[in-house]
Amino acid sequence: MNFVSFAFYAVFGTNILLHWGVIPHSMKFSFMSWQRLLIITIVTTLFSLLQALFFRYVLQPFGLINLLPVFYFAFFSLSMFLYLIYKKYIVKSELVFMDFFTEPVSVSLLVYLGVLIAGMQQANLTQIMGIGFFSVLGYCAAAILVNDIMERLELQDIPYVFRGYPILFITVGLILLAFSGLDKVFFYGIFNKL
Amino acid sequence: MNTQQYSSVENKYFLLFLGIMPILIAAESLKLGLIIGSLYFFMISIAVLTVSLSRFFSDYNFFFFLQNFIYALILVFVTTLLRIISPFLFEELHPVLYMFAFTTPVLTIFAADSKQSDQDWAWQKISEGLLYMTALVIIGFLRELLGTGSITLFKSQNTGSESLLAIFLQPSGAFILIGILFAVFKFVSRKTKGGAA
């Protein structure tokens, strides 16, 4: 599998939106500057590697797979802790910690889901790191796509009952349909034949 | 239509709905809807119970982490128990069960509302949890009915060959179905209000 094929698969086939249905809460997506996006992808990549190592060399050999939720909790807590440090000492901004949809928790969940997606794959360590990296990028791409579509729909004359959340869900559903279609195209090898 | 409405934290119930989307997507049949719904109700009851204890902690951030750790331990207990009782069912369900690790922070925030010492508050939260459990079961039922054209609750396994509208068994179908259900509720509530006026 060449790099482009792998990136294609990781962005569309292991997309967080596709697997977990997590709709981006911030439609403007303003919190995701390039600097933060880079940090999140690097942290997700490293955590994916850490998870794979821990799973293969500790949990599986000792028959402790049932402890996975505790391990996931540790990842969530660690990523949130790192993000809090980043916000406090690098960005030096005020935090409203206990709001779920403020940055620390939502970004930590993004890292956590990226790690989870990577952990589900049967792949070697390099590929798992790649999946962690591209799954975050894929999610950001999907979020920007949803944002753009919703902005364009503002100008359209949509029936009253479909305005707001119904059209948001249907839009995300159609995007997911396209994503899973692209994934299947790749899966059946058509991509390689082109 | 204003896009700002989607990022408004005032609509807490809708945001909770978004938070439980992973398990809504997993509920692709009536059987899964019942199992996931029951577990969800169990977890939200535990969340309400633990949040009511938060008044004993001065540092709420510490309590938040402690509570999520307790959730993780409960999840370990549930999965271990299921693995002992029915290994086959565990193999079928374990990816779904691990999804609850994702929902725990969401449930914590949902349960961490004001009036934590109020008994009425606890009952209100539990009844809301029951409502979401019912939603999970209904969505599982509808997806299986639309996807396969039948309900296979009492069969040991789905043959996989039956399909009516297979899209509804996919995550994309779940979103579209939920969007349509939202529109139907909006239509019905509008008609009801119009009738009442």
Image (cartoon, coloured by chain):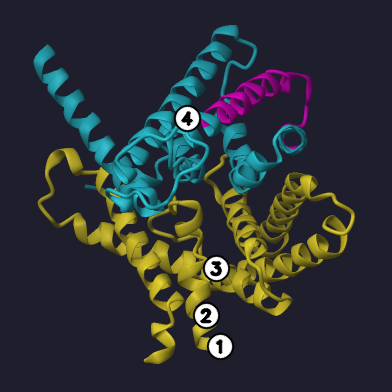
Label 4 residue SS: loop
Taking B157 as reference, is A57 above or below it? below
**Residue under numbered circle 3:** A135
| x, y percent for residue A26 | 43, 53
Q: Is residue B56 magenta?
A: yes
Residues at discs 2 and 4 both on one chain? no
Against A55, residue A185 (above or below) is: below
Residue A126 x, y percent position in the rendering: 70, 79
Residue B3 appears in the figure: no
Q: Chain of mark 3?
A: A
The chain that hosts pointer 2 is A
* Tag 3 secondary structure: helix
Identify the amino acid type marked 1: Phe
- Give the label, 2 or 4, closer to the camera: 4
**Cβ–Cβ under 8 Å for marks 3 and 4:** no
Cβ atoms at labels 2 and 3 below 8 Å apart? no
Q: What's the mark number on residue A3?
A: 1
The magenta segment is: B37-62
The residue that label 4 is drawn on is: B154
Chain B, chosen colour in render: cyan
Q: Residue at x 62, y 21 (%)?
A: B45
Q: Main secondary structure of the magenta part?
A: helix
Q: Chain of mark 4?
A: B
- Label 2: which residue? A7
Tag 2 and tag 3 share a subunit = yes
Q: Identify the mark nearer the N-term, 1 or 3.
A: 1
Tell me: B180 left or right of A99. Answer: left
Task: Name the element at disc 1.
Answer: helix
Q: Amino acid at mark 2?
A: Ala
Front residue of this view, candidates A83 and B109: B109
Q: Are discs 3 and 4 both within one chain?
A: no
* Earlier residue among tags 2 and 3: 2
